[in-house]
Amino acid sequence: MHFGTPPARTSLTVLALVASLLALVLGGAGPASAHAALRGSDPAEGSVLGTAPKQVTLTFTESVGFSDDSLRVLSPDNERVNPRPAQHVDGKDDTARVELSDGLAQGTYTVAWRVVSADGHPISGAFIFSIGKPSGTAAVVATDSIEDTAAARLYGILRHVAYSGLALLVGAVSFVLLCWPTAAALRPVRRVLTVGWVALVVSTAALLLLRGPYETAGSLASAFDPSQLGRTVTGRPGIALLVRLALLAGAAVLLRRAAARLGRHHDDGTTAGDLGTRARVVAAVLASALAFTWAGAEHASAGIQVPLAIPVAVLHLLAMGVWLGGLITLATVLRRRAPGGGEVPASAVGRFSTVAFAAVGVLVGTGTYQSWRQVGSWEAMYTTSYGRILAVKLAAVVLVLGVAFLSRRWTARLDHGALPAAERPAESEPVRLRVVETVGAPSSPAAPVAGRTPDTPAPGEPEDDTGPPASDSAPAPAPETEGHRRRLRRTVAVEAALGAVVLAITTLLTGTQPSRAADTTPAALAPEPQVKVVTVPFDMGTAGQKGSVQITLEPGRVGVNTVEAVVYTADGGFATVPELRLTLTQDDLGIGPLDAKLKNQKGYWATYDLQLPMSGPWTLSITVRTTEIDQITVRETIRVT
């Protein structure tokens, strides 16, 4: 039987799948969330309160979890003023509240928070508010990326190992159950199964230990802290990891039983060649449960359409395992079969070609939905990190589909070359006729007996076993068939390598904030430039009395800043002036004017200790004096973060 799809039909199907993927992924949609984002706070960011508040409350775009140190309120002297850990407000999972100490002094307070969003990823941030009037603050909060810790980096690596283990385990089992049952007795296949199971067990156990430091930005040594482990195993990600370990223990028992059954000899000397439908059903249920431990604790578990997103994510993971893990298994048996030990049956290769093509179809379909759900627009493909990484993944998938098309071509030719003679196109072959000879008599042709075909022996006459071998004997492969097999090995190896690249990109995507969540993040939380530069023109109305002043504020944040000012002539040259003054005013809060006290640095004006107590828009008032009697004041607004 020929299992390959005709090349023309295959290519059209692949093109249709890719076109559907691009069209649906990049279609417009409304905003939603995946990683949580801070939606509001009480007190509000940058507010100045007349009296000290009793508590601080944060509201997020989705449910969050936290530890004892998830929410800290720091005084101007960098002392913690919330004696108890955060709690949800009235049972609402998208809120966090801490009570404050009594008798808080006037000044600027810093709120630093780090929580875990519903999809299992930690997020963090900070803001300030003031009591009475703004002041300087000695509070120090971490400004590094939430992924820029040793625990976070190791956690990301182990997440990739876990995905790889799942792919190997699911792929090897599906290859045996669906394509070549007797392959379970082969050492290369058992090695793939063992590597996949061990990788998944070790990575899952390590992820369980590292979950606490990953969430709290702690050190690697804190992975063995009993209190932190206790919090991990009671949270959704920790429960999912524990369930995964239990499922892997059950899988080990079932795999050993299956291996024993396949290795058991029957009375006639044969061995079991197929585990049956029951084994396939049990394997499918177990694999689905394993995949659910990812889907139920990551991106699919948060955002829009969760009841649909979780089963779609399960299908996506299973299809990935069947395709990529099956490819690796096929590549292993194609390359490691010893000479003279038999080849992989062409029928098994053909069956895997059909199964893999179906898996790729499921991958494209489920990936289309997941990408639409997380991206939602054309613009997000190049304006967000998630979109750019997804674009790279799409390019890799297109390459994989191209190589897969070549693999299916060689599979079809190999399968055709292995067809039984009765199924091949008719060819004229010589017909053998049975010749009856008399012992001692010369040979002579004999007429066939009536009612019998030439090859049918007469009644009582023994069967002729001097003819060609029986049809089930394995003839030596033809040179053309061997060439197809070599080309298939190469394309399968390339396809598996590209599939591993796709898997690595997918792992990176699971740790990246989806584009929809980025769209819902308040603008105040977006990264700001480290240097603020404004150029303000001035014109005194007389010849030679016009130009511009360039003000550079570094870093442009609350706290100590450096200010440098350069005066330019109208034609862009440097100008020297006898005096340059700069004051800053926060009009909304009535702060200022604050004198920057610029000093002449022989070519430019500067100060290196300007204290800005509050974020928000500040008005710059720049006074330029060019002569004893000519001066002008110009104004511009700059945002301090």
Image (spheres, grey):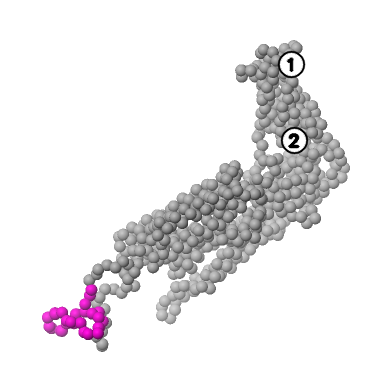
Task: Tell me the element at label 1.
Answer: strand
Q: Name the disc covering residue 83, or none.
A: none
Which picture quadrant has residue 298? bottom right
Q: How packed is label 2: few (under 14 Cα within 10 Å), some, or many (20 or more)?
A: many
Taking the image as shown, residue 286 lies to the left or right of residue 57, namely left
| Residue 165 visible in the picture | no
| Residue 279 visible in the picture | yes
Observer-nearest of 631 and 540: 540
Residue at the spot 73% in from the left edge and 22% down from the top edge: 634
Task: Tell me the element at label 2.
Answer: loop
Q: Amino acid at mark 1?
A: Gln
Magenta extent:
431-457
Residue at the spot 48% in from the left edge and 51% down from the top edge: 398
Residue at the spot 70% in from the left edge and 23% down from the top edge: 606
The number of numbered discs placed on residues in the rendered structure image is 2
- Decide: is 640 above or below 447: above
Q: Is residue 425 magenta?
A: no
Q: Amino acid at mark 2?
A: Ser
Which picture quadrant has residue 477? bottom left
- Decide: is 144 above or below 446: above
Residue 48: x and y in percent read 82, 38
Q: CA distance from mark 1 to mark 2?
A: 30 Å
Query: Which SS type dominates the magenta stretch?
Result: loop
Residue placed farthest to the bottom in the image? 460
| Label 1 or label 2, whichever comes before in sequence order | 2
Residue 387: x and y in percent read 58, 46
Taking the image as shown, residue 454 lies to the left or right of residue 391, namely left
Observer-nearest of 126 and 392: 392
Q: What residue would you read off at disc 1? A: 631
Observer-nearest of 509 and 216: 509
Q: Name the disc covering residue 615, or none.
A: 2
Residue at the spot 62% in from the left edge and 58% down from the top edge: 309
